[in-house]
Image: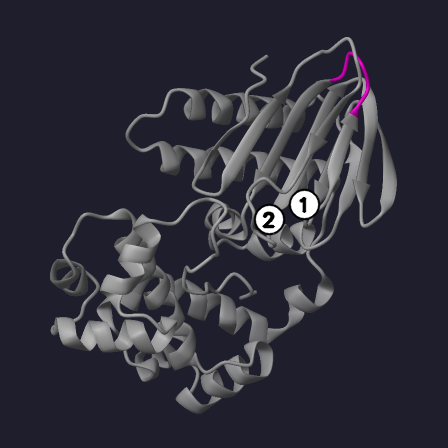
Amino acid sequence: MPGTHLTTSGLLVQGIGSSLHRKIWRLGHLNVHTSGALVCLEDGGGLIEADGRPHTLEAPTLFWLNRSDGCRLITDAGTTGYLAEMTEDIVTRALGDFPETATLKYMIDHDHHFAFDRNSANGRAISSGFLAMLSELQSPQNGMEMLLVAYLRIVLVSVMRMSGAQQPQHARAGSSRQFLHHFRRLVEDNFLAHWPIARYADQIGISHDRLHAICRRELEMTPKALVAERLAREAGHGLERSTLTIEQLSHSLGFRDPAHFSHFFKRMTGMAPGQFRQIMSHSSPDGPNTSPTNFADWP
């Protein structure tokens, strides 16, 4: 089993190979306060130290940590399994926008410890998912990020099924949450088209004022601010990862005037696009997180 830890795009995966001695695995390598961790032990045992408290692990077992910074895993001799750390951003991408997304998000918002049946269909899917992520990280190819997100989704859904996590009643029953879920899906599909908020409301089947009231009450933000946040996030990714000029990027994001794009981006992030790109090109994994905010807290 591969034992080298590898990281890319907010995901770090390690294979826990059998050892003759006890091993200590320090978490928080991603240097992001909002990173979570999933521990999968197939054989052996150990403990996790989180929030100053030890949690005993006896394989086969799974342990989800909502926050991994400052934690450590101690494995006994002979223990095998996997350890993954992931940022909120890549988890949000893996969760996607599906009816089960609220259930998954509810699950990962809390620490969970439960038995792992490695011989079940879900157990085999989890092990295969970890192996696939490790293989992809060891031999990067085109489309690697897409596959990593897909494999991570398989693992998280399989964990949800194995844990028996259920969507909380308020998330199932509240019509406001249903409207927000629909709004988010529409935003994801149409934010580059710069739809006016009234059009989103029409598509959802509610008034502009009601959509505004729901967003203010549930998320403490206006619909316009939420759409702008999504657009700024996409712009930040483009400035960081693409080779497009700022003018080309502004047109790809639906801005007719690059000056309008620059004004929008500076208003959202406090930096001009060129300044943001320069900072990101010289940033290190240990540097501050300067990416625009995301809308991971939507239901």
Residue 138: percent from the left, percent from the top?
A: 43, 21
* Image colouring: one colour
Q: Which residues are magenta?
A: 75-79
Residue 248: percent from the left, percent from the top?
A: 12, 59
Residue 102: percent from the left, percent from the top?
A: 60, 57
| Left/right of residue 12 with respect to residue 28 in the rendered view | left
Residue at screen point 44% across, 83% down: 206
Residue at screen point 33% across, 84% down: 198
Vertical order, 149 against 248 (above or below): above
Is 17 magenta? The answer is no
Residue at screen point 41% across, 78% down: 225
Vertical order, 226 against 281 (above or below): below
Say which quarter of the image contains residue 105: bottom right
Residue at mark 1: 68
Q: Main secondary structure of the magenta part?
A: loop
In primary-sequence order, the first of circles 1 and 2 is: 2
Q: Amino acid at mark 2?
A: Ser
